[in-house]
Image (cartoon, grey):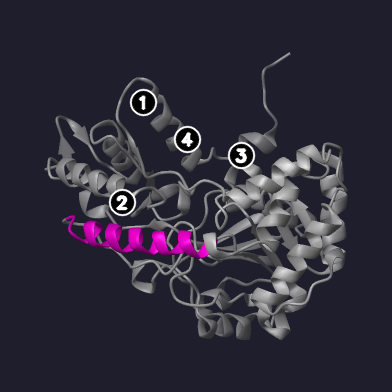
């Protein structure tokens, strides 16, 4: 008997974001003072009213299996959120709650993609998108948009990437890893292409919806032509600082939701009962904590962009949302320090971690090897100290 994993697993790449976070934790455990700019997680605590709802749920014995698609009360609260905040009409039967938005994306792909069908993924992309497409036996079709395009694909690129095998487009706005946000006009231009190809669905990852510095969030699902072809992915992790509660949702045509329900019923069932009651409180309670956190992220954005622009050789855009910057750093490739050569973004990220004690993530895992991702979901003090270290150790490269 051989110790051989399945071909399905062997063709997957490990998550670079989780790997770097783990390396950072290992150094910290050894007593090294590491500043972690690698993790996509708010450093705020979950608001008290949400925690109180969870405590009440425990006291009220919400300790049994929930329905596979989630409690009706939570799905009703999500439908109300979509109507009130986004102007979108969904019935609770068109909503499915899962163990985080990550599972929602995977559910959607597994539900609609057949073997050999293509899924268009604009790059830079979140590290898991291509791997999830592979899990669904689909073919990732990467369309690159560089810093000169503010990391957003244009209609001509979208049109050129479409074939008879195209099944879906994954669109993340606000974006992880770049913080770019598609405007209403930019989305309209993409919709004008998509309406010519009615066989294509859009998986709209909107998990950073509320971390938006340019006004009201616009969903591609708000375009009437796209409502029945859009699978909205969202959840509570980023907006409400609830990453560990693991609650995300899909809003989509009912036949897709039923398919995801069938799938989820076979491999996880419904998500955590207590977390669902906490998420219900998040959607029905005060939204002031969300606004306060966004204001803090904006201050941090302004600070980190200022400091990054002071680094010689960095090219930096000003992100319109999320909590990442994605500077182009390829000017450092080929340089070295103490015999240690920087050949790519992964080398640079490891150099910053091991020599500068600042954790970032190389851009190759995001489909942009010329860049590096830095999260500003940490304090202004940490950001300032991190960039003092970064400037110092990059200055040593010759």
Q: CA distance from mark 4 to mark 1?
A: 13 Å
Q: Vertically, is 172 above or below 281? A: below
Q: Nearer the viewer, mark 2 or mark 1?
A: 2
Q: CA distance from mark 2 to mark 3?
A: 40 Å
Query: Along the polypeptide, which appears first: circle 4 or circle 2?
Result: 4
Query: Along the polypeptide, which appears first: circle 4 or circle 1?
Result: 4
Q: Position of residue 338 (x, y in %)?
A: 14, 30
Q: CA distance from mark 1 to mark 3?
A: 29 Å
Q: Nearer the viewer, mark 1 or mark 3?
A: 1
Q: Nearer the viewer, mark 2 or mark 3?
A: 2
User: Residue at label 1?
Assistant: 27
Q: Nearer the viewer, residue 182 or 42?
A: 42
User: Residue at label 4?
Assistant: 19
Residue reaching furthest top? 1
Q: Residue at x 28, y 31 (%)?
A: 354
User: Residue at label 2?
Assistant: 380
Predominant secondary structure in magenta?
A: helix
């Amino acid at each position: 008997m051989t110790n051989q994993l399945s071909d399905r697993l062997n063709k997957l790449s490990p998550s670079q974001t989780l790997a770097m976070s783990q390396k950072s934790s290992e150094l910290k455990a050894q007593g090294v003072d590491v500043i972690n700019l690698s993790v996509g997680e708010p450093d705020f605590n979950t608001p008290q009213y949400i925690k109180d709802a969870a405590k009440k749920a425990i006291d009220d014995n919400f300790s049994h299996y929930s329905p596979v698609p989630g409690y009706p009360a939570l799905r009703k609260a999500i439908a109300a959120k979509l109507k009130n905040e986004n102007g979108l009409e969904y019935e609770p039967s068109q909503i499915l709650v899962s163990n985080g938005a990550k599972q929602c994306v995977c559910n959607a792909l597994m539900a609609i993609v057949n073997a050999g069908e293509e899924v268009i993924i604009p790059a830079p992309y979140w590290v898991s998108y291509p791997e999830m497409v592979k899990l669904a036996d689909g073919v990732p079709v990467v369309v690159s948009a560089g810093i000169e395009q503010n990391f957003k694909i244009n209609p001509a690129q979208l049109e050129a990437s479409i074939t008879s095998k195209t099944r879906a487009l994954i669109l993340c706005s606000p974006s992880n890893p770049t913080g770019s946000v598609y405007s209403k006009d930019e989305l309209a231009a993409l919709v004008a292409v998509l309406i010519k190809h009615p066989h294509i669905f859009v998986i709209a990852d909107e998990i950073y919806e509320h971390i938006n510095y340019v006004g009201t969030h616009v969903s591609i699902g708000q375009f009437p032509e796209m409502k029945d072809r859009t699978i909205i992915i969202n959840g509570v992790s980023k907006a409400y600082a609830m990453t560990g509660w693991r609650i995300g949702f899909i809003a989509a045509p009912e036949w897709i939701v039923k398919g995801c329900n069938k799938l989820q019923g076979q491999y996880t069932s419904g998500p955590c009962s207590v977390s669902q009651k906490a998420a219900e409180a998040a959607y029905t309670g005060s939204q002031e904590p969300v606004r306060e956190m966004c204001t803090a992220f904006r201050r941090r954005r302004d600070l980190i962009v200022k400091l990054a622009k002071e680094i010689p050789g960095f090219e930096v855009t000003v992100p319109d949302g999320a909590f990442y910057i994605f500077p182009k750093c390829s000017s450092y490739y080929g340089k070295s320090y103490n015999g240690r050569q920087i050949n790519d973004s992964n080398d640079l990220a490891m150099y910053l971690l091991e020599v500068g004690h600042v954790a970032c993530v190389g851009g190759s895992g995001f489909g942009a090897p010329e860049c590096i991702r830095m999260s500003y979901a940490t304090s202004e003090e940490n950001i300032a100290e991190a960039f003092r270290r970064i400037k110092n150790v990059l200055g040593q490269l010759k």
